[in-house]
Image: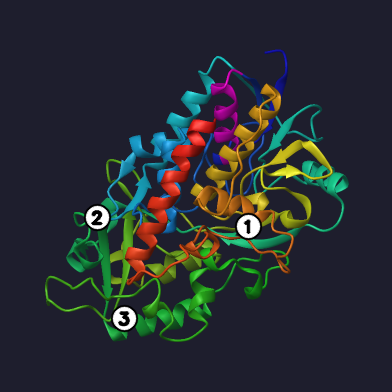
Amino acid sequence: MSEMVTVVGAGLAGCEAAWQLAQRGISVRLCEMKPVQHTPAHHSDDFAELVCSNSLRSDELANAAGLLKEELRRLDSLILSCADAHRVEAGGALAVDREAFAAAVTEKIKNHPNIEVVYGEVTEIPEGRVVIASGPLTSDTLFDAIHAKVGGDFLHFYDAAAPIVTAESIDMDSAYEASRYGKGTADYINCPFSREEYEAFWNALTTAEEAPVHGFEDSKVFEGCMPIEVNARRGFDTLRFGILKPIGLPDPKTGKDPYAVLQLRRDNANGTLYNLVGCQTHLKFGEQKRVFSMIPALRNAEFVRYGVMHRNTFLDSPRLLDATYALKVDPRIRFAGQMTGVEGYVESTASGWVAGVATAMDVLGKPMPTLDRLTATGALATYISDHTVAKFQPMNVNFGIIEPLGYKIKGKREKNTKISERALEQIEKLKGEL
């Protein structure tokens, strides 16, 4: 195969796109600026680094995120195969040992005979067919080149990551292991609050000093990564009905649900690191230690990573891209990942799969099978290319964007499961067409 395709960015979407191209016999030049240059959110030199949570969310077919993962498994996704191989227990969710996962993806990519890895910043849109998956923290120089190409305005929102603590520093006399409603095998460490402890924590959280983030406003934060202090300012009980919800997590010492509870989720396979679930934040580092150490089980916690916040940039995709993530004014260029307006690890992977396969079909001179709203993968592609959307915002996969059944089924879980079964039938047909 004489034609080479360039993929810019070795995150989840870029690695998936490169893999799908290479698996179809196409030569790929994968350009990655790490380790020559890092963004504010990245710490590792490996590809497919998970910078926020280590959870890929629900793995159940009654959940849209679970459906999307199962679709990608059946479509031979590199990212899903590596995630499954390095999963850590997290109840009904798929969570991974982030370092082992990234190392596995990196090894697969580097050892593929059809992939050449080139390190260094890309400052211009490459010639020929290209998939740009440079992420929501695209460098300023490449951003300017993309902006000059597409014209108009980019949109943006702010994203945040949660702190990570060492397991040995958690006070287990003030915590207990359990999964909500008994799902899984006690996969979370739960840190309970009394009313008095919660009130003191809430007061400290809502008055703590925040790190300056240029242009930040609470209204510009994406709901899926809302900083805990922004969430807390919405009301005294907001956290108790959200990330600190105690329902279904009875304290074995009392047999009753606590007033509030923070869950810690394993961040690596050997269980030496735990992240504070839902506690993404942009408080100053000293303030993070002070405030989170007010949680009884974390009074002596050792923080190996503090939460950070950064600006995420994304395209006005419905005006710019088609359902294969191709730029309408220049279809040789495709985009993938969060910069297209898909929000989440698995959603980014799905966009990379579509962009990679569609580009491969172009190179091979074959038609790309139609992606529609009958599948989660197709529904995301349809959402980002729907020109009727008035105010485009990043979107996680959900059953609201997937084609309804057209008939009634009693029970939400039963209905969603039936939608998932129909979607997987379509995926099997798609595999046959490919």
For label 1, the SS is helix
Q: Is residue 16 shown in magenta? A: yes
User: For the C terminus, which image quadrant?
Assistant: top right
Residue 19 image position (x, y, % from top left): 55, 28
Residue 430 vertical position relative to residue 196 in the rendered view, above or below: above
Label 2 sits on residue: 187
For label 3, the SS is helix
Alpha-carbon span between mark 3 and mark 2: 24 Å
**Residue appearing at x 35%, y 51% in the figure:** 59
Alpha-carbon span between mark 1 and mark 2: 34 Å
User: For the N terminus, which image quadrant?
Assistant: top right
Residue type for callout 2? Asp
Overall secondary structure of the magenta section = helix
Alpha-carbon span between mark 1 and mark 3: 43 Å
- Cβ atoms under marks 3 and 2 closer than 8 Å: no
Q: Which residues are magenta?
A: 13-25
- Cβ atoms under marks 1 and 2 closer than 8 Å: no
Reading the chain from its start, which is encountered first: label 3 or label 2? 2
Reading the chain from its start, which is encountered first: label 1 or label 2? 2
Residue 297 vertical position relative to residue 108 in the rendered view, above or below: below
Question: Which image quadrant is residue 160 in?
Answer: bottom right
Residue 336 image position (x, y, % from top left): 64, 43
